[in-house]
Image (tube, coloured by chain):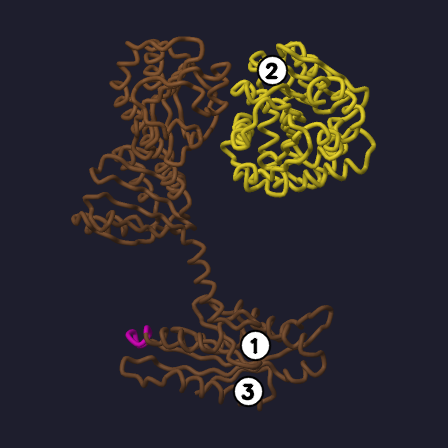
Chain colours: A brown, B yellow
Amino acid sequence: MSTFDDAALTGLCQFARLATEADLTMAIEIEADGTSVWAASAPALSNARFNLARSGLTSHAWSGEPVDGAAFRLPTAIVQVLGGPASKVLYIPAPSHGAPLSGLLLLWRNNVPQARGIAQLPLLAQSVARLLTARREAAREVIVTNQFVDLVESVPAGIVLIDGDGAGTVVNERAAALLGCTAGRHRAAELAGPMRALRQRCDNHDELDAAYAERMKDVDFAVTLNWVMGERTFEVDTHPVRGNGEYGRIWLFTDVTADLLMAAELRRLAASDPLTGVPNRRHFEERSAQIIAAREATGRSVAVLMLDVDHFKKINDTHGHPVGDEVLKVVAKRCRDALRDRDLFARFGGEEFIALLAAPSADEVPVTAERLRSAIASAPINVDGVRVDVTVSVGGAIGEALPDGETALLDGLIARADEALYAAKAAGRNRVTISD
Amino acid sequence: MEIFERFNGHRSGGGTEIAILSHGFGTDQTAWNALRPWFEERFDVISFDLAGCGPQGAATYDFDRHGSLFGYADDLLDIIDELGVSNCTYVSHSMSGMIGAVASIARPDAFKRLVMIGASPRYLDEDGYVGGFKAENLEQLFDSMSANYQAFVAGFAPGVVGVDNSEVVADFSNTLFQMRPDIALNTSRTIFNSDVRGLVAQVSRPVHVVQTAVDMAVPVEVGQWLASHLPDATLDIIDASGHLPHMTAPREVIEILQRRLAGSAA
């Protein structure tokens, strides 16, 4: 950002005033519609906006000689400096880039124009035009820079922009907060440290280091990687400016933590039973297939336990469906708590639940089944003050996950466990039966 | 007539000498309704709505140009030039007082004399000068204006009118509501931040300063300051309250006009 020093134009006005004995000298920037957008003057003028379209000033054919002031309608903001109407007026057009009516205005009220000084004025016109053009460009640059800053800060991402020569960088506020530096311009060398430190703070920094090390050989590399910092994850996109690394490089840091959590939540919702919160049947089948596939290599055993709430219809009929639903929730929770973390547990449908025990020892299966049964039968379920005595029947089946084993192992295990469950029910319920 | 029409200009009356009636903040040219018949009998009467005021106010207001009183003075001179006015009697209320002063300095030939009702060259107090307002009061005024314009008007209008005259309060409220709130806020900032005391001594035409004894916007001291710093001035203080005597005490104002403008047209 560059700023314009208007002292040069003010000095020029002072010089012209002295040389010509004018009462007021102004360098005015005037746009095509007559609007004055800026002025330097001697003596100084409070910064009022005015329009010179109807003044007659910009339409007069100036020959470099002062003319009678009565011919012009000058803005009151100018005349008030004189203390009354101007007797003589001289305008030296100095068209500046973008403000074609600009020029140097000289007004006399009490003094008499000095011919020798006036003869020098055309020489000043070019300097005035050049300075006005420079001022306008400086003002435009400030506006463009401000717009650029507004734009950069309006993006919901941390931005680090590295210049093409690799020397300068621009950091927006979000990126500054991440990097622990101030927003704005930095030398690239100053920023290398914070950038490296940020990456080292990532849980996956080894992986990131390797990924970048390989790509950085190419000046035009572009890659998007997730930087994991504890609970937060940033998607970090780096690419060359306009596809060419020689123009510079952009780093964009987008906090995707919320997106990732949302995605995980959506996955969980898709996989779980809405009533009990445990996985649903579809998820159970997918996960079981994965677990069994993993076991196949080792040839270890797998067991399935089927569990059914005894006389569930009677619970519903006696206490109503809301109590029945509550019973299913408690059953699911007690079962889940009675199993090992690595065991898979799901609602299979209705009042039926299923568990897959990975790599159990032979005597572990009936013990686990009994643990489930007693987890339910040991204490009544209390629903809003209503005491419900609940029992479950459990059927189990064990199989070998062999490398050349039949693909329908799970279906077979479920069928056998279901038969065993039926046998447990037939034998009087609230008991465990394991298939041979 | 393009400019005159843009400012909703009206011309009436049977006289030959021109009187320009220029209203103050928060009103429009209808503020002159009570005095207009008196002027029409004696003058060629010209009135218009200031930039930002009246039914077309939003179209005439320019936030840059009207950021100082000079922009309004330029508008006045544009109208004067377009209508070929010279040697006029300029009758003004409130902010139009200093607008006329500035215009008369730039173009003395256009003005024969000025009447300023409730005028002030500076509203803020300063060491040795009573303007009637303190900076923090003004900030409160601007804040309440921008927060809720309706509520502001409801509180501001009766205070400015200053007397128990529900008809004038209703008229003043209506013309205040007619202003776009952002323009009203900017206009009041321009007025209350103005300080043209340095120009007062340059006014070469006779000025008749009129004000009431109790005016929320312009204390008596301001009228006295003006009358003593203007090169050629009279001062009449009406023994009444309020900032709008041309609306609330027209008979007293006419009595003063009769006396001060006597001679030529009046």
Chain ID, mark 3? A
- The answer for how far apart the CA atoms under marks 1 and 3 are is 11 Å
Residue that label 2 marks: B205
What amino acid does circle 2 point to?
A: Arg
Q: Where is residue A145 in the image (x, y as percent from the top left)?
A: 35, 36
Question: Which residue, given by chain and number where applicable, does mark 1 sit on?
Answer: A373
Span of residues in magenta: A294-299
Classify residue A417 as left or right of residue A168.
Answer: right
Q: Residue furthest left?
A: A217
- Under circle 1, the secondary element is helix
- A200 or A318: nearer the viewer: A200
Q: Is there any visible trace of residue A31 in the rendered image?
A: yes
Q: Mark 3 points at which residue?
A: A424
Reading the chain from its start, which is encountered first: label 1 or label 3? Answer: 1
Q: Do the residues labelled 3 and 2 touch (CB within 8 Å)?
A: no
Compare residues A297 and A47 and report the one nearer the observer.
A47
Q: Nearer the viewer, mark 1 or mark 2?
A: 2
Near-viewer residue (A279 or B208): B208
For residue B218, side relative to residue B58 (left or right)? right
